[in-house]
């Protein structure tokens, strides 16, 4: 069964921005927890268990539609430049706003980065002692910054934003390591 992808401004399905899921019906807003240990027993988990799709938007151009499979796990999906992209998100109890944000950024990379990184991340995930998405993203960000000459270019708002995001991913990896 093919899914019909609606534009990011759709008012017919719930839309998440940052750490809030906005619903077209009561209760209208549900908080999305930051870390997995805060998901159990929340309205967010209840909503995920009872529903099968939503859209998550970080900013214009950085978004995805989330779909729950028949097996109970979620995937991020998006058509970008005419090609379908899909990323595994996990089971409902593992969906946090930091994971959703990371997935939105990953699935929204330009074609040359996304498809190159997709083949690299398959290799990293299948390596012994497989690594989580945040660790893979951190490595890919470092490779991206090095190949684009990050240290040799004058500081711009875009580069500062990318550096801030890289630092945020690094902190997420550190936080996850402490929990494990």
Image (spheres, rainbow, N blue to C red):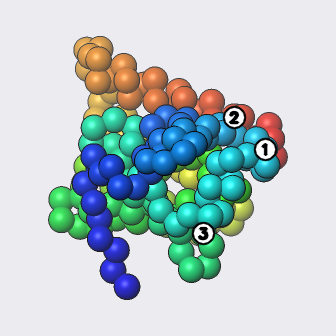
Residue at 29% in and 17% down: 157
Query: Visible in this render: residue 90?
Result: no
Identity of the residue drawn at 51% across and 41% down: 28
Q: Residues within 10 Å of mark 3 (few under 14, many from 20)?
A: some
Q: Is residue 53 visible?
A: yes
Please state which of residues 142 and 85 is positioned toward the viewer in this rendering.
85
Q: Residue furthest bottom?
A: 1
Q: Position of residue 169 (x, y in %)?
A: 55, 35
Choose between 105 and 13: the one closer to the eye: 13
Height in image: 72 above or below 97? Answer: below
**Residue under label 1:** 37
Tell me the residue at 55%/59% (across/down): 89
Is 65 displayed left or right of 35 in the figure?
left
Query: Of residues 158 and 40, which is closer to you in this image?
Result: 40
Q: Earlier in the sequence, mark 1 or mark 2?
A: 1
Q: Give the alpha-carbon distance from disc 2 to disc 3, as whole Å.
A: 25 Å
User: Which residue was labeled with disc 3?
Assistant: 73
What x and y, as percent, mark residue 38?
Answer: 76, 41
Q: Is residue 22 left or right of residue 60?
A: right
- Check the picture and name the quadrant holding the N terminus: bottom left
Q: In the rendered structure, which disc, 2 or 3, sits on the residue that comes first in sequence?
A: 3
Provide the residue designation for mark 2: 174
In this view, 167 is above or below 3:
above
Q: Does dot 2 land on a helix, a strand or a loop?
A: helix
Question: Considering only order in the chain, which callout, 1 or 3, is on the residue closer to the N terminus?
Answer: 1
């Amino acid at each position: 069964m093919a899914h019909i992808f609606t534009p990011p401004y759709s008012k017919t399905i719930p839309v998440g921005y940052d750490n809030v899921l906005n619903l077209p019906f009561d209760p209208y807003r549900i908080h999305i927890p930051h870390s997995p240990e805060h998901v159990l027993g929340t309205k967010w988990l209840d909503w995920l268990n009872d529903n099968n799709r939503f859209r998550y938007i970080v900013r214009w151009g950085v978004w995805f539609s989330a779909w729950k499979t028949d097996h109970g796990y979620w995937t991020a999906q998006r058509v970008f430049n005419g090609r379908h992209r899909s990323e595994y998100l996990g089971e409902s109890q593992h969906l946090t706003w930091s994971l959703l944000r990371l997935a939105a950024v990953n699935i929204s990379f330009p074609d040359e980065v996304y498809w190159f990184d997709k083949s690299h991340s398959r290799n990293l995930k299948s390596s012994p002692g497989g690594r989580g998405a945040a660790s893979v993203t951190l490595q890919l960000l470092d490779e991206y910054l090095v190949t684009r000459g990050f240290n040799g270019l004058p500081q711009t708002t875009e580069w500062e934003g990318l550096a801030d995001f890289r630092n945020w991913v690094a902190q997420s990896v550190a936080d996850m390591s402490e929990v494990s």
